Image (tube, helix red, strand yellow):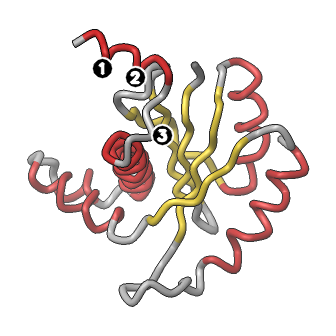
Amino acid sequence: MGRVLAIDYGRKRCGLAVSDPLRICANGLPTVRACDLMAFLKDYCGREQVDCIVVGLPLTTSGELSESNRYIEPFLKHLARELPEMKVERFDERFTSRIAHREMALAGLKKSRREEKELADRMAAVIMLTDWLNSRTLSGNLTPEQEEKETDI
């Protein structure tokens, strides 16, 4: 079973997170400049088994697509051309940046560290991927390995 990679896409920087091979937890990857993202993805997917890329779906509080979706769409088209076999899913990313900043404050990080945009982007990607993993488990969409372990319990 392969990993799942999550992208919190931004115009300048992209926060990245990846699951462990069993898809139990999410870990942050280095933040990548948007202009370098495709090269990073091709390299990473060439080294690691990645089965799915989850890209943040920017929605407003009323559930409509936000303005930032207009610069994510061209990236998604480019991704489909460059990695045509890769499964890509969109996932609600509302409030992930706000939650990331709150968690950094609760963790006791100094204000200067909390203001590091790369750290906040990485944490937002981890939060989004964690939510995606949890939604799959709660909806019963377990991987074959996870289903096997469930029946062994």
Asked whether disc 1 touches disc 2, contact meaning CB atoms under 8 Å apart, the reply is yes
Q: Residue furthest front?
A: 151
Badge count: 3
Q: Quadrant of the C terminus?
A: top left
Foreground pick, 109 / 107: 107
**Residue 62 picture location, percent across and down:** 39, 90
**Residue 40 picture location, percent across and down:** 71, 37
The residue to which callout 1 is attached is 150
Residue at (71%, 38%) from the top-left corner?
A: 41
- The amino acid at mark 2 is Glu
Give the mark, 3 or 1, whose residue is nearer the N terminus.
Answer: 3
- Within 10 Å of disc 3 (Cα), the crowding (few <14, some 14-19, many 20+) is many
- The amino acid at mark 3 is Ala
Residue at (68%, 56%) from the top-left corner?
A: 34
Element type at mark 1: helix
Marks 3 and 2, how far apart in space? 24 Å
The residue to which callout 2 is attached is 147
- Within 10 Å of disc 2 (Cα), the crowding (few <14, some 14-19, many 20+) is few
Asked whether disc 3 touches disc 1, contact meaning CB atoms under 8 Å apart, the reply is no
**Residue 16 picture location, percent across and down:** 52, 44
The residue to which callout 3 is attached is 17
Residue at (83%, 38%) from the top-left corner?
A: 85
Element type at mark 3: strand
Say which quarter of the image contains residue 116. Answer: bottom left
- The amino acid at mark 1 is Glu
Foreground pick, 101 / 70: 70
